[in-house]
Image (cartoon, rainbow, N blue to C red):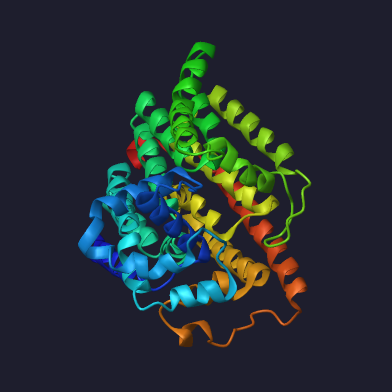
Amino acid sequence: MPVLIIFIGTTIRIILLPLAAHGDTWSALRGEYYWINFGIFRLNQFPEVLQAVYLRLIDAPILQSALPSLFDTFFPIQGLGGDVQTKLVANPMAMRVLFFYKLPYLLFDMGCVFVLFKIFTQKRNRIIAALLWALNPLVLHSVYMWGRYEIFSILFVLVAFYYAKENKAFWSVLLFGLAVAFRMPFILVLPLLIIYFSDNWKDGLKYTVLGLLPLFMVNQLMSFLGPDTSVYYKSVGFFNFFASTGLVGDFAPVGINYLVYPVIICLFLNEKRKGIGFVKLVYFAFTIFLTTFSFSYFHPQYAAWLTPFLLIAVTLNRKLIIPSIISLILLYLLINYGLGETTGLGLFLPSSAIISHLPKFEVLPFDNQMNTTVVYNLFIIVNMYLIVMMYKDKDRKNSEV
């Protein structure tokens, strides 16, 4: 049964590989192309460096004839948008480039399945985890439709939580630190792991240094490769989002998360004093990102960051399945009303003009602003319900996983 589910999930992903991409992906790919061919370094994130290395490794026969035809007319580097992007994705080689460019995403995604099966030993839990993985809209949208590299950090988070379950503090904290280096916002969860493994202040200091070490090393590498490309520099935008309460597409700096986040950490410390298990660790990590997306502006691709915590939490507590599904539906309605078809069917522009021009189905009868407000408030309510359910759930023993 799990094998069939994994086959279905893999098939869906392979189909999506060449069919869709956002302008962010085309822009990153173009930057990688110029770096490996002309030595011009304008990459924004460490995963883009790895993607560039990958393009160099697979090199000639596969993409060499495609990349120049796609990008040479856009040299020197300029912004993608409007007619430029439309012409780019209309190139007959576009789908071929997308397929091979996103292929590492699939490999890392398959790694996620392997780790989930290491985390869960019971057959029933493995079936549920496989189903959640196969049909997870967060990854299908952010990674395979949008075309971004969120799956890299997701895999490292899952491996880190596997080692947390096995109570192997060194590898858990180090690998989670690697996830932070790939996507710095995961640093919000790092204090939970440090608290989870620490028995005294010396442990806390040791694990803090260990968890931040990959971020420091990657930051040094990025700073060496090009000016203004450090991880810290490029992550400022996210923390502006974290400090806001704007709706999707409507950034407004206020800072409610500055109040909510310390409360979550304090509650976790209290749980630690009473004795805390692996499941509660997952619950609190999930809670941090649920509150982040509930109370602050977020970019649609960021939603994939919920994935590792959602997969583990919902597999362990099946009562969370229905509210999680409702939350995801509301999430994508919110994205739709906040940012429109450019983050939905419009992503399929490379493959089919027909798909991108399908009529929109209006779920709510109000104007767009009212629809956004209604969905946003429902989204917050459902997420708060999820958090309460997790907080009240009795912690399970690792043997039940």
Measured as percent of width and height from the top left, residue 319 is found at: 49, 56
Q: Is residue 13 visible?
A: no
Measured as percent of width and height from the top left, residue 267 is found at: 63, 32
Quarter assignment of residue 191: top right
**Image height check: is 139 above or below 159?**
below
Report the residue at 31% width, 71% height from top.
96
Left/right placement of residue 342 relative to residue 116 reads right
- The quadrant of the image that shows the C terminus is top left
Q: Nearer the viewer, residue 235 or 337?
A: 235
Left/right placement of residue 342 relative to residue 219 reads right
Report the residue at 64% width, 46% height from top.
237
Quarter assignment of residue 94: bottom left
Report the residue at 53% width, 58% height from top.
301
Q: Is residue 317 visible?
A: yes
- Give the number of marks: 0
- The quadrant of the image that shows the N terminus is bottom left
Quarter assignment of residue 243: top right
Q: Nearer the viewer, residue 289 or 79?
A: 79
**Image height check: is 239 above or below 32?**
above
Measured as percent of width and height from the top left, residue 305 is found at: 50, 50
Q: Nearer the viewer, residue 175 or 219?
A: 219
Measured as percent of width and height from the top left, residue 107 is found at: 28, 54
